[in-house]
Image (cartoon, grey):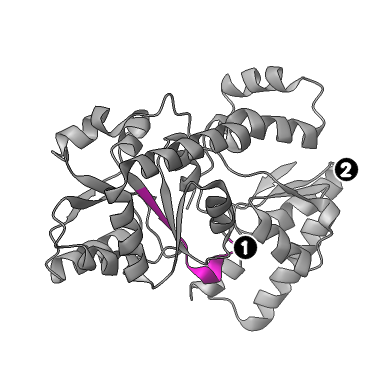
Amino acid sequence: VVAKTDPPLLSIVAMIAARIKRAALVNWLQDLFPEVASELGANPLPRWLDALLRRLRDASLRAARVNVVLGSRMCELLESRGIPRSKLRVIENWADLIAEPVPPAASVLRSSLELGGKFVVAYSGNLGRAHEFDTLLGAATLLMSQRDIVFLMIGGGAGMPLLKRAVLQQGLDNFRFLNYQPRSALADSLGAADVHLVSLRPSLEGLIVPSKFYGILAAARPVIFVGDPDGELARIILPADIGGVVRAGDAAELARQIAALKADPRRGQAMGDNGARLYAQRYGLERALTSWSEIIDAREPASALTQAVRGGDALTRAPSGR
């Protein structure tokens, strides 16, 4: 039984069902509840019930054959709660299937928005409660005089209308807002940017990993992460030289890094190329399927499992990332 974390705390029910059926339980943790709700101030549970559910959730993790987590910070957090390291396995998420990376000049979306000659800073995907945008807003204000820098916001989420309202209130004209683009146009949409932004509130490190990160790597674009300098993505970005890291709230540093990339296109291209190579080596679908086949002890070789999954299994889709 492979139990994901949508709906939250499903592992508790899965643990009971697995025991009744004498099945092996594998928990696939995309996030950790009720901790996420508590950090976002959206936990309606009384303290005693919250504590009870955490204990039951932890018991379901200890009862599993293995728990698949998304990164080292999540692994460390669960170890601190008494989950044996032997029952934790890191398998990062992956991108939706992207063909060859699209150069900025070849992006249909970029051309349709008349962004040729501009330096495009993009945010693509969900801008939700887990993602702060004040740092981005501050950097855009500092860079407003540089008319060739444009912030392209593609997607939705609870934070997107709030950001749009703040942009209007402050009279910023260096933003473009678009709804989610068709999945078939993902490569072209990601290719419209010169650099992509990813953010995560520092208090959510170890609870969530923004999976939009992997699509950026596959698209061969540099990435700037805004959040905890010791966060999951920060631990990847700096050693691999695939972009920059900015502490949440440091708008001046974000503006500086954006301006530096605009001034040195070759540097940005090199970072993007590094990211594409890293994706191919560590974060592709083939790698994920190989890791999963090891966990479930599939008799089929990884290549056969890959073909079976691509024939219709939901694993060909990237997990719904935050």
Q: In this image, 45 relative to 113: left or right? A: right
Instruction: Evaluate whether residue 70 shows in this view.
Output: yes
Q: Amino acid at mark 1?
A: Gly
Identity of the residue drawn at 83% across and 47% down:
65
Q: Is residue 174 above or below residue 280?
A: below
Evaluate if marks 2 and 1 touch, with contact meaning CB atoms under 8 Å apart: no
Query: How much space separates mark 2 and mark 1, taking CA atoms?
Result: 31 Å
Identity of the residue drawn at 70% across and 77% down:
51
282 and 13: which is toward the camera? 282
Residue 310 at x, y percent in the picture = 57, 22
Residue 315: within the magenta?
no
Q: Is residue 218 above or below residue 131?
A: above
Q: Quadrant of the N terminus?
A: top right
Identity of the residue drawn at 17% across and 33% down:
111
Q: Which residue is mark 2?
A: 22
Q: Earlier in the sequence, mark 2 or mark 1?
A: 2
Q: In this image, 295 relative to 288: left or right? A: right
Q: How dense is the environment of label 1, judged by Cα within 10 Å: few (below 14), some, or many (20 and up)?
A: many
Report how many numbered discs are placed on residues in the image.
Answer: 2
196 and 129: which is toward the camera? 196
Where disc 1 sits, the SS reads loop
Q: Which mark is residue 206?
A: 1
Q: Amino acid at mark 2?
A: Arg
36 and 53: which is toward the camera? 36
* Residue interval drawn in magenta: 196-207
Residue 153 at x, y percent in the picture = 27, 51
Q: In this image, 71 relative to 247: left or right? A: right
Residue 137 is drawn in which quadrant? bottom left
